[in-house]
Image: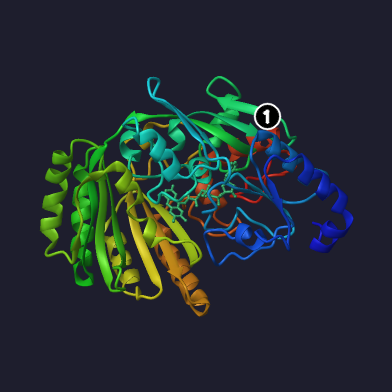
Amino acid sequence: MKSMAEIQSVDTKEISALREVLRGQMLVAGDPEYDEARRVWNGAIDRRPALIVRCANVADVQQAVAFATRHGLPIAVRGGGHSVAGFSTCDAGVVIDLGLMRSVFVDADARVARAQAGATGADFDRATQQHGLATTLGVVSTTGIAGLTLGGGIGWLMRKHGLACDNLLSAELVTADGCLATASATENPELFWALKGGGGNFGIITSFEYQLHPVGPMVYGGSVAFAREHRRAVLESYRELARKAPDELTAYAAMTSAPDGSPVAAIAACYAGDPADGARLLDPTKAAVGEPLLDNLGPLTYSERQSRMDASYPPGEYHYWRSCFLDDLTDEVIDILIERASNIQAPPVLELIVEQLGGAIAAGDGAFAHRDANFDVLIAANWTNPADHDRCVAWARDTAAALGPYSRGGYANYEPDAEGAYVSGAYGDRLARLGAVKAQHDPTNVFRLNQNIPPS
Ligand SMILES: Cc1cc2nc3c(=O)[nH]c(=O)nc-3n(C[C@H](O)[C@H](O)[C@H](O)COP(=O)(O)OP(=O)(O)OC[C@H]3O[C@@H](n4cnc5c(N)ncnc54)[C@H](O)[C@@H]3O)c2cc1C
């Protein structure tokens, strides 16, 4: 890899030439916007790219890929910048940032949306909900659709409509040789299969085409939080709820902190059907636990459900996340969650979030490996004081280790670092097939700053 000094001294003319041909913007160290542009959501990631190319169109992406490969520079691809691991930035390489490409075009009659790859969940929901339509995306609306979809994409609609990647109809991408390709069920079908869970390994997606579904505008959901001593009752009531949940209901149980910092046990949910049916399911679960501290369960718009948790995850704080897919929420697992949650103190905010999977996910086709898991546990350490780094990371790692015997691997989109220890667990039995697709489309591993699949 070239050093920053080498890049700046040797390639000054070429950098100017690249700047000339771009429709978008290019930033280098010293440019007024450089420091803001190099930031990603996770404030613990502090890297200094040689170039940040803010692409305005597909040709800009092609120019940036060609420049980086010609000079042997690493490429980091940025959609919404929410990679907890910090994959969307790098030191002394080229960040190809699609954040200016955020348009979403909806064909309401066909129930199809084409979205540019820099769009966030909020951009997407805003465009599609105007027509009473939606597809599965994440539960924090500032997250980019690109990284989320390519890694799988779990969210409030997944049990009814599948993962975000299951709703992909096609994708347009710039490949490692700078060419433009389409992947769909009929064009490059093996590549299309790999994009549905295989992450950013195969090229830079410039636009995605998604199947939409009638959703809302009103759904039933929100969250209800109880004092910490109700943890076991919350987890046991949640397990009961999950056992009888129809596919319209997606619910999470969380050991977390209230806005005032006190530890709480909560249930968050979205019932994407008749709100009255949602109330009939969720209200008895709430009553079975006891008197809540906070309760905003009720009818709300789908867009409000999608953005309600945004304020809890602002950019710039420090984060280290792990995750474990589980077959079942057994008594042993509940004991571990309660024991690990007893370490939760605020600040920092250490969270254990149990996400119910199942429903339509099992029927999907694609590289996402954990279709038969019934739950995922997100282990999220979030802090603001750098001095808390070591104990937060240790808490998350120890919690993942405690759940390890019950788990079949973690969710690639939550896993924390580029060292790759989690890769076999994340891709499971899909890894060999993914390696073959990688060898065909990116044999020299140009796209390696991601949940990396070695070409095989
Ligand atoms: C607050 C928060 C909430 C989250 N909630 C959920 C959730 O509800 N459900 C869920 O499934 N996940 C969730 N995640 C995880 C999320 O899916 C990943 O962080 C994902 O990478 C975010 O996508 P992004 O485009 O913002 O990421 P970026 O950081 O921009 O990109 C991450 C990686 O994705 C790949 N990538 C991005 N854009 C492209 C592209 N155009 N072409 C090819 N590769 C690309 C690259 O490998 C890149 O390094 C959440 C994360 C955060 C921080």
Judge whether 128 appears above or below 426 on screen.
Answer: above
Residue at the extreme bottom of the image, as rendered:
387
Q: Please name whichever residue, 453 or 147, is drawn nearer the observer in this view of the structure.
A: 147
Q: Quadrant of the N terminus?
A: bottom right
Q: Identify the residue at horizontal 87%, vertical 59% (top origin).
A: 9
Q: Is residue 153 visible?
A: no
Q: Is residue 10 visible?
A: yes
Q: Quadrant of residue 195?
A: top right
Residue 141 rendering spot, x and y as whole percentages: 41, 49
* Left or right position of 362 against 26: left
Residue 32 rendering spot, x and y as whole percentages: 68, 61
Q: Quadrant of the C terminus?
A: top right
Q: Identify the residue at horizontal 63%, vertical 45% (top origin).
A: 453
Q: Amino acid at mark 1?
A: Leu
Q: Identify the residue at horizontal 73%, vertical 41% (top origin).
A: 22
Q: Identify the residue at horizontal 31%, vertical 73% (top origin).
A: 261
* Left or right position of 429 against 454: left
Disc 1: CA contacts within 10 A as few (<14), some (14-19) or many (>=20): some
Residue 361 rendering spot, x and y as whole percentages: 37, 37
Classify mark 1: helix, strand or loop: strand
Give the residue at mark 1: 180
Q: Quadrant of residue 30?
A: bottom right
Q: Quadrant of residue 335?
A: bottom left
Chosen colour scheme:
rainbow
Residue 136 rendering spot, x and y as whole percentages: 38, 38
